[in-house]
Amino acid sequence: MIYITPAIKISENEIKLRFIRAGGPGGQNVNKVSTAVQLRFDVKNSPALPDQIRYRLTRLAGRRITENGILIIEARQFRKQERNRQDAIDRLIKLIQKASEKPKARIKTRPGRASKERLLAAKKQRSRLKRTRRLVPISED
């Protein structure tokens, strides 16, 4: 069991780990050892997630989630397979924890009198500046 919050626990059976070769520098070690980890978690069909958290998680995941609702996290930061595995799981936990936080409701506010006056003063100043840039008509006397 992976404990995310006191109310949310994910079974390790729901997470699929695949070890792949990591690109980048590293010489022969990179070419022969599969240290990078690809974690797959089925968000759409997970019984551990309530609907609201599932919705917020799909919004937070962005491009990391497929059309079928599978979240894919790749970890290739470390040279050790076990550290990459733990990094991928930690990133999944943080993402679900962030999704479980309820967004703060926005309270509509209206601009105050002082801010309205500042806005009008700035507009008048800009108007004066533009007026001085105009061509002065030549009057024929």
Image (spheres, rainbow, N blue to C red):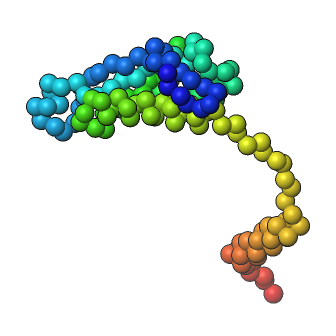
In the depicted structure, whether residue 38 falls above or below residue 95: above
| Image side of residue 106 versus residue 58, left or right | right
**Residue in the picture at 16% in, 37% down:** 26
User: Residue 77 lies in what quarter of the image?
Assistant: top left
**Residue in the picture at 87% in, 63% down:** 112
**Residue in the picture at 44% in, 23% down:** 72
In the depicted structure, whether residue 80 falls above or below residue 13: below
Is 125 in front, or is 114?
A: 114
In the depicted structure, whether residue 130 falls above or below residue 73: below
Image position, residue 74 (x, y; %): 37, 29
| Image side of residue 18 versus residue 90, left or right | left
Residue lying furthest bottom in this view? 141
User: Residue 127 lies in what quarter of the image?
Assistant: bottom right
| Image side of residue 5 versus residue 133, left or right | left
Q: Quadrant of the C terminus?
A: bottom right
In the depicted structure, whether residue 112 falls above or below residue 31: below
One can see residue 60 in this view:
no
One can see residue 6 in this view:
yes
* Total marks in image: 0
Residue lying furthest right in this view? 113
| Image side of residue 19 versus residue 7, left or right | left
**Residue in the picture at 82% in, 47% down:** 107
Image position, residue 133 (x, y; %): 68, 75
Image position, residue 81 (x, y; %): 27, 29
Is 35 in front, or is 114?
A: 35
Image position, residue 132 (x, y; %): 72, 78
Is 101 in front, or is 106?
A: 101
